[in-house]
Image: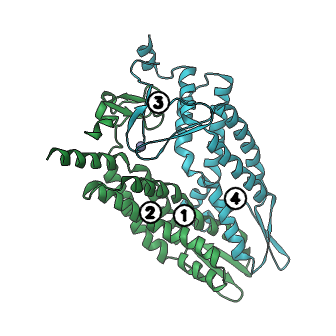
Chain colours: A green, B cyan
């Protein structure tokens, strides 16, 4: 039983990414007659583009975590540069464990987990065995949904800088770490968008059909 | 329907499984039998519900942006903060791109989403063939994930926790409006039936000539 025949592409159809209409594969590269979106049976250069965006995000993780995202100046302390991890530690010192865990998750665990999860999917498509596909899809959906929550710390910096402006008494200034961190969030979101999950199924069904022939 | 377009079948966007279009009645959710992705989220009257929610959202957007979200009080001096000012201070600090990100994700994208949804659901409700409906629907779908109001709300709460030891923080009218706006936009996303919208847009008139030639 060749299950790859159940795919739309295997039956000569492609699905419009934007309006989900089905068209013959001969329209590949043309624009969708219903909505005008470019038609592709699979996202073009999906793997290369996802790798490029992932590597960019991984590199930006370094300045995002090493450089300060803001500098706090108060009467007592002068010009405390605060990194993301420093901010989390500061929260735990004040006993605010709940909020510290939320910030830690949004700012460090989610971006790192997201980069690793997408990389593992890419490796599975290109080199590995495409097994446990339903689990992989669940992982992908979580990664796709959760990515935007990493903007949390950027918004916090904006709010704190806007609020704490009391002349020489107390003020907060945004720092370049915030730029690198915003870059990580945007690039990982774009990476999840360009990864075409249908390639995982293609790989799996290819393996299955080779396995059944030999 | 167009002869080129076998509309009795649908394909999964995540695993490419081709299947018969299921019979749908009322509010119903259909998931892909192979990979579990959401295929159809059916809501009859989706256009009417979306129109009402989008208009409510546009009204709430005004106080959410015009009134201060938080006010900080230190030694009798007050500092107010709006969503817009939290973007502008980053621009002042030389972080133009970060300011742009906040401006886009917390103000412009939510605004554009509501405007597009009002335009689309208005056209579908009134059955008017307004221009560029397919482009509006595509733009809405692509913008969807970049609206981050609920993330902003959590950021406000984190900021309150960080500041509450040092100074007096007061919530403003902007914060309550923001909460209501998030409730309305979340409801409008859940009530949107993209499949129905696309069919209604196609029924209103074919925007691209190529389909006309396929018909007659
Ligand atoms: Zn289309
Ligand atoms: Zn599927």
Splitting the image into four quadrants, where does ligand 1 fall?
Answer: top left
Do callouts 2 and 1 mark residues in contact (Cβ within 8 Å)?
Answer: yes
* Residue topped by disc 3: B21
Name the residue located 43 percent from the left edge and 54 percent from the top edge. Answer: A192
Task: Name the subunit of mark 3.
Answer: B
Percent coordinates x, y for residue A187 in the rendering: 45, 58
Spatial CA distance of label 2 from label 1 is 10 Å
Name the residue located 30 percent from the left edge and 28 percent from the top edge. Answer: A26
Which residue is situated farthest in the bottom direction here? A76
Q: What element carries label 1?
A: helix
Marks 4 and 3, the one that precedes in the sequence: 3
Marks 2 and 1, the one that precedes in the sequence: 2
Is the residue marked by circle 3 packed among few (<14), some (14-19), or many (20+) residues within 10 Å?
A: some
Task: Name the subunit of mark 4.
Answer: B
Spatial CA distance of label 1 from label 4 is 18 Å
Quadrant that contains the C terminus of chain B: top left
Percent coordinates x, y for residue B151 in the rendering: 62, 60
Spatial CA distance of label 4 from label 3 is 44 Å
Q: Specify whether disc 3 shares its chain with disc 2.
A: no
* Residue topped by disc 4: B83
Q: Is mark 3 on a helix, strand or loop?
A: loop
* Residue topped by disc 2: A114
Which residue is situated farthest in the front direction here? A1
**Nearer mark to the viewer, of 4 and 2:** 2
* Residue topped by disc 1: A150
């Amino acid at each position: 039983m060749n299950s790859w025949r159940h795919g739309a592409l295997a039956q000569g159809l492609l699905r419009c990414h934007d309006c989900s209409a089905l068209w013959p594969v001969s329209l590949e590269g043309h624009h969708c007659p219903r909505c005008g979106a470019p038609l592709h049976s699979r996202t073009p250069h999906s793997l290369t583009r996802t790798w490029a965006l992932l590597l960019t995000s991984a590199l930006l993780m370094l300045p995002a975590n090493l450089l300060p995202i803001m500098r706090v100046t108060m009467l007592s302390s002068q010009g405390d540069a605060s990194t993301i991890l420093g901010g989390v530690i500061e929260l735990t010192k004040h006993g605010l464990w709940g909020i510290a865990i939320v910030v830690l998750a949004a700012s460090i665990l989610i971006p790192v987990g997201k980069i690793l999860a997408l990389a593992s999917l890419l490796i599975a498509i290109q080199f590995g065995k495409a097994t446990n596909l339903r689990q992989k899809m669940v992982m992908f959906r979580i990664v796709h949904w959760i990515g935007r929550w990493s903007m949390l710390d950027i918004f916090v910096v904006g709010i704190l800088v806007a609020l704490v402006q009391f002349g020489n008494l107390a003020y907060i200034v945004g720092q370049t770490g915030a730029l690198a961190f915003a870059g990580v969030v945007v690039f990982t979101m774009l990476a999840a968008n360009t990864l075409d999950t249908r390639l995982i199924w293609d790989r799996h069904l290819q393996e299955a059909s080779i396995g059944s022939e030999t | 329907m167009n002869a080129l377009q076998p509309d009795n079948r649908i394909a999964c966007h995540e695993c490419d499984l081709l299947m018969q279009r299921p019979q749908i009645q009322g509010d119903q959710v259909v998931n892909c039998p192979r990979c579990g992705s959401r295929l159809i989220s059916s809501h009859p009257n989706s256009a009417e519900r979306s129109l009402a929610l989008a208009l409510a959202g546009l009204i709430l957007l005004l106080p959410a942006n015009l009134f201060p979200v938080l006010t900080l009080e230190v030694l009798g001096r007050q500092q107010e903060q709006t969503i817009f000012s939290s973007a502008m201070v980053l621009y002042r600090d030389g972080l133009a791109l970060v300011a742009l990100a906040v401006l886009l994700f917390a103000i412009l994208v939510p605004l554009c989403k509501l405007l597009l949804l009002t335009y689309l659901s208005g056209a579908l409700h009134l059955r008017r063939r307004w221009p560029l409906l397919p482009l509006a629907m595509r733009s809405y779908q692509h913008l969807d994930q970049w609206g981050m109001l609920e993330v902003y709300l959590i950021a406000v709460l984190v900021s309150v926790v960080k500041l509450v030891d040092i100074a007096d923080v007061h919530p403003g009218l902007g914060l309550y409006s923001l909460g209501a706006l998030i409730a309305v936009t979340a409801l409008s996303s859940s009530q949107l039936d993209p499949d129905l919208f696309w069919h209604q847009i196609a029924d209103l008139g074919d925007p691209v000539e190529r389909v006309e030639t396929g018909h007659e």
